Image: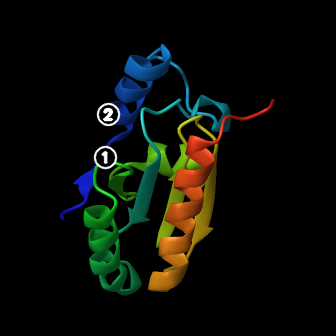
């Protein structure tokens, strides 16, 4: 399954639709939106060989978790605001965004078992109501 390119504007529009966040909101760590489902975002640049090598693994995961987790990719050369929003400084990097908007960033490519475990944890965290 091909990963969907995501732009800052699309992310903000999606945010507004799901959590009534204003599309004019400035980027900050607290502006990560509440999501319909958990999200995995692959931050990359087209000329990065580790990013290219990692892509097939992400595509397999996107197919495996279709309908449960949304998978996106962000070219940080084109979408610097997304990199700033998630505080991404190196690629490849993955953002695991829970349904409640909380997220964690993992820098570097992950082995298949580690990626699977991270997505499973994301699904579990999104299914478990927070007590805060």
Using the numbered discs, state the Cα–Cα distance from disc 2 to disc 1 in whole angstroms.
6 Å
Residue at image coords 25%, 60%: 3
Identify the residue at the far right of this view: 132
The N terminus, quarter of image: bottom left
Callout 2 secondary element: helix
Q: Nearer the viewer, residue 44 or 118?
A: 118
Callout 1 secondary element: loop
**On screen, residue 3 above or below 55:** above
Q: Nearer the viewer, residue 128 or 16?
A: 128
Q: Quadrant of residue 50?
A: bottom left
Q: How many marks?
A: 2
Residue assigned mark 1? 6
Residue at image coords 53%, 56%: 95
**30 sits to left or right of 43:** right
Q: How is the image coloured?
A: rainbow
Q: Are marks 2 and 1 in contact (CB under 8 Å)?
A: yes
Residue at image coords 44%, 83%: 112
Residue assigned mark 2? 10
**On screen, residue 115 above or below 24:** below
Percent x, y for residue 108? 54, 78
Query: Which dot marks residue 121?
Result: none
Identify the residue at the far left of this view: 1
Instruction: Note whether residue 121 is visible.
Output: yes
Instruction: Note whether residue 46 is visible.
Output: no
Percent x, y for residue 9? 34, 32
Percent x, y for residue 70? 35, 49
Residue at image coords 28%, 73%: 60
**82 sits to left or right of 7:** right
Q: Residues within 10 Å of mark 1 (few under 14, many from 20)?
A: some
Percent x, y for residue 52? 30, 80
């Amino acid at each position: 399954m091909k990963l969907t390119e995501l732009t800052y504007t699309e992310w903000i529009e999606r945010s507004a639709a799901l959590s009534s966040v204003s599309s004019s909101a400035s980027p900050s760590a607290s502006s990560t939106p509440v999501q319909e489902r958990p999200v995995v975002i692959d931050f990359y640049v087209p000329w990065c060989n580790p990013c290219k090598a990692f892509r097939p693994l992400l595509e397999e995961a996107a197919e495996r978790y279709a309908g449960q987790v949304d998978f996106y990719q962000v070219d940080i050369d084109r979408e610097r605001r997304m990199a700033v929003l998630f505080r991404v400084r190196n690629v490849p990097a993955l953002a695991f965004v829970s349904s409640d908007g909380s997220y964690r960033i993992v820098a570097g490519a992950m082995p298949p078992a580690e990626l699977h475990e991270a997505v499973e944890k994301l699904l579990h965290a999104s299914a478990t109501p927070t007590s805060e």
